[in-house]
Image (cartoon, grey):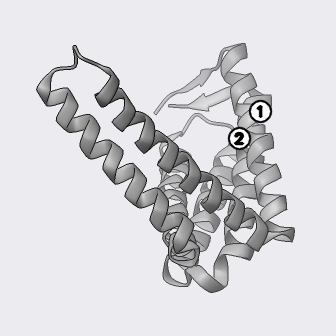
Amino acid sequence: MSVTKTSTSHRLIEIILGLVALAVGVLALFFPTTVVATIVMLFGIALVIIGILRLAAILSSESMQSFARKINSIIGILAILIGAVMLFFPLLAATTMVILIGLGLLIYGIGRVVVGIASGNLNGRLRILRILFGFIILFFALIIIFFPIYSYALFASMAFILIGIDSLASGIAGISAI
């Protein structure tokens, strides 16, 4: 892997993502139930709306091909069903969402460890920091995946805080390990 200087826009995106991850991590740490319930409800509502819009597009379009109609109807119906499940069974939706967050964090943690190990020409401290953060996030991810109900508040919030710090460091330093 090589280390490259990133563009100003890339650095800005890294910094913004870092700040958002930090904010989500801190909010989840102090208001875990509220954050998860809000995300589940908003996502459920969004899926129902998306599903209705897909079905409306089928009804209002005369020029849509048969295959596109079938795909849009399947997507619309699935979106409505999944959105309804999220709204009517929020605990199931929250548990599923937390497990998916854990899987995402697992992938992110593996990526940080691999980048840290493979980036031989990266600054020594930054390299160690990436490997360390990667292993910590991997640890948090495994706890979240295997104990979703009991762990999301502490471990998911801490993982998001670490991701925020990592993104801010990359954005401020302007270095990306590719």
Q: Nearer the viewer, residue 45 or 113?
A: 45
Disc 1 target residue? 15
Q: Position of residue 83 (x, y in %)?
A: 48, 57
Where on the picture, by quarter, is residue 26?
Answer: bottom right
Q: Nearer the viewer, residue 80 or 150?
A: 80
Disc 2 target residue? 167
Q: Which mark is residue 61?
A: none
For disc 2, the neighbor class at 10 Å (few under 14, some 14 to 19, many from 20) is many
Q: Position of residue 148 (x, y in %)?
A: 56, 79
Looking at the image, which residue is at 35% across and 37% down? 55
Looking at the image, which residue is at 73% across and 48% down? 21
Secondary structure of residue under mark 1:
helix
Secondary structure of residue under mark 2:
helix
Name the residue furthest left.
66
Placement of 162 over or under 5, stated as above or below: below
Badge 1 amino acid: Ile
Left or right of residue 94, residue 167 in this image: right
Number of callouts: 2
